[in-house]
Image (cartoon, rainbow, N blue to C red):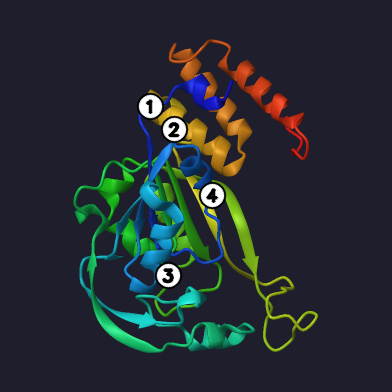
Amino acid sequence: MTLEELVVPVEPIAIADVGAACLTEVPAYKPLLDSGLAHLHAFDGDPRQIEKIRETYGDKVTIRDCFLSDGGVHTLHVAAAQSGMTSLLKPNATALQFFNGFPQFGHIHETRPVQTTRLDDVRDLPAIDYLKLDVQGAELAVLENGRRTLADCIVVQLEVSFVCLYEGQPSFGDVDLFMRRNGFLPHCFLEVKKWSIAPLLKAGDTRLPFNQLLESDIVYVRNLLSLPDLSTSQLKKLALIAHHCFASFDLAVRVLIEIASRGAVASDAQHRYLGILNARAQQPGSQPQP
């Protein structure tokens, strides 16, 4: 038995990835796509990124080639495609110079005006269950102009900065306050990125850090302390996301207990799930499970 068979989801999980360029990161939601449990709506206004997104996800993706923000015209600051630093915000030269390598990463080749779209104004976008944001400092602007879309989300994953690399960029604290005020609590950090302070290098490698925090992806969950407020469909999707994307097996168990209390899964669903985890732990190369 699998968790999918245990919860019998009614409909696919709808994922929106804003800033979906396929660079070096393997997104946490990829197992959902690989298992046929989800469909991806990929947003990226940079034409250099579109073909790679299409090649990577095939028929599992709907591509939306637009820049999301407040619906106004903004200046796009175009950096090298592989740097990941093309942004609607201007790089902060002082912050870039603080870190090894960033003056080169954040070098702007050209600027041009672009028309942005509000997330809530995107046509034919279904209710989004899992929202991912990585838009180089514009995350809060997207969220503020996507409150209706956000109201349907169960999970939000977004990049936050501890040291802001762009002028006018909201900090981690600003984003965290917004998320809490809109019913979300932090669940986990994914990779926490540190970076070395210029000019000292560790072993001569720009990418080997000492201790200075730079940025991280953080995952927020809606109604984390009041799961009964979520619908049964949302809870089933949350269990699958927690299991497949973050290895948050404790959260999945808690969710299964709530679903079972409604009679929507077997009364012993949490014990069957632990059996699934234990069986997987017996497979060669598996990580220890609870």
| Alpha-carbon span between mark 4 and mark 2 | 15 Å
Q: Do the residues labelled 4 and 3 touch (CB within 8 Å)?
A: no
Q: In which quarter of the image is residue 183?
A: top left
- The answer to which of marks 3 and 2 sits earlier in the sequence is 3
Q: Quadrant of residue 143?
A: bottom left
Mark in front: 1 vs 3: 1
Residue occupied by mark 3:
137
| Alpha-carbon span between mark 1 and mark 2 | 6 Å
Rendered location of residue 274, percent (x, y): 66, 22
Instruction: Residue 28: give its label.
Output: 4
Q: From this view, report whether residue 180 is shown above or below residue 102.
A: above
- The answer to which of marks 4 and 2 sits earlier in the sequence is 4
* Left or right: where 115 falls relative to 95: left
Query: Is residue 84 visible to the viewer in this orientation of the structure?
Result: yes
Residue count near mark 2 (Cα–Cα under 10 Å), binned few <14, some 14–19, many ≥20:
many
Secondary structure of the residue carrying numbered label 4? loop
**Quarter of the rendering occupied by the C terminus:** top right
Secondary structure of the residue carrying numbered label 1? helix
| Alpha-carbon span between mark 1 and mark 4 | 21 Å
- In the foreground, 71 or 163: 71
Q: Name the residue at 56% across, 68% down.
A: 162
Rendered location of residue 111, percent (x, y): 32, 86
